[in-house]
Image: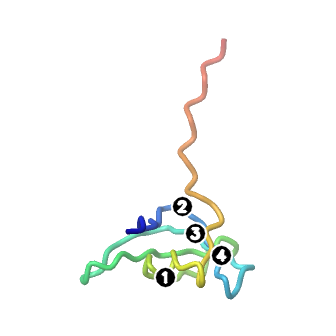
């Protein structure tokens, strides 16, 4: 059995049909039928938001992952 791909907050995707638009996952939830969904925000405009099932986002015919979630910044080292 193949491992399931997961969608995480902060991941960025390109729509295969419109690769000029970059989408970022801003919210994850599971609907009443147990299907995981992600709300995406257009990185360039910040105005357009769309919701897709995580299955659609992990379908390489529909979307391409372009970056992983950004990790929290490490604590700054104290000055010596």
Q: Quadrant of residue 33?
A: bottom left
Q: Which residue sits at x=70%, y=79%?
A: 21
Find disc 1 in the rendering and name its residue: 56
Label 3 sits on a secondary structure element that is strand
Find disc 2 in the rendering and name its residue: 10
Q: Which quadrant is the C terminus positioned in?
A: top right
What whole-number distance in Å separates the C-alpha atoms at marks 2 and 3? 6 Å
Whether residues under marks 2 and 3 lie with C-beta atoms below 8 angstroms apart, the answer is yes
Q: Is residue 29 left or right of residue 21?
A: left
Q: Nearer the viewer, residue 60 or 12?
A: 60
Counting residues from the start of the chain, the first of labels 4 and 1 encountered is 4
Counting residues from the start of the chain, the first of labels 2 and 3 encountered is 2
What whole-number distance in Å separates the C-alpha atoms at marks 4 and 1? 12 Å
Q: Above or below — where is 8 with respect to 20?
A: above
Q: Which quadrant is the N terminus positioned in?
A: bottom left
What whole-number distance in Å separates the C-alpha atoms at marks 2 and 4? 13 Å
What colour scheme was applied to this rendering of the protein? Answer: rainbow
Query: Which is more foreground, mark 3 or mark 1?
Result: 1
Label 1 sits on a secondary structure element that is helix
Q: What x and y, as percent, mark residue 57?
A: 51, 77
What whole-number distance in Å separates the C-alpha atoms at marks 3 and 1? 14 Å
Whether residues under marks 3 and 1 lie with C-beta atoms below 8 angstroms apart, the answer is no
Residue found farthest to the right:
20
Q: Which residue sits at x=61%, y=73%?
A: 23
Q: Nearer the viewer, residue 45 or 20?
A: 20
Counting residues from the start of the chain, the first of labels 1 and 2 encountered is 2
Label 4 sits on a secondary structure element that is strand
Q: What x and y, as percent, mark residue 29?
A: 35, 72
Query: Which is more foreground, mark 2 or mark 4?
Result: 4
Find disc 4 in the rendering and name its residue: 14
């Amino acid at each position: 059995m193949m491992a399931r791909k997961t969608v995480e907050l902060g991941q960025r995707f390109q729509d295969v049909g419109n690769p000029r638009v970059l989408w970022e996952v801003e919210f994850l939830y599971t609907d009443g039928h147990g299907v995981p969904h992600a709300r995406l925000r257009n990185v360039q405009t910040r105005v357009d938001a769309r919701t897709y099932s995580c299955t659609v986002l992990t379908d390489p015919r529909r979307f391409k992952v372009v970056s992983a979630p950004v990790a929290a910044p490490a604590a700054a080292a104290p000055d010596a």
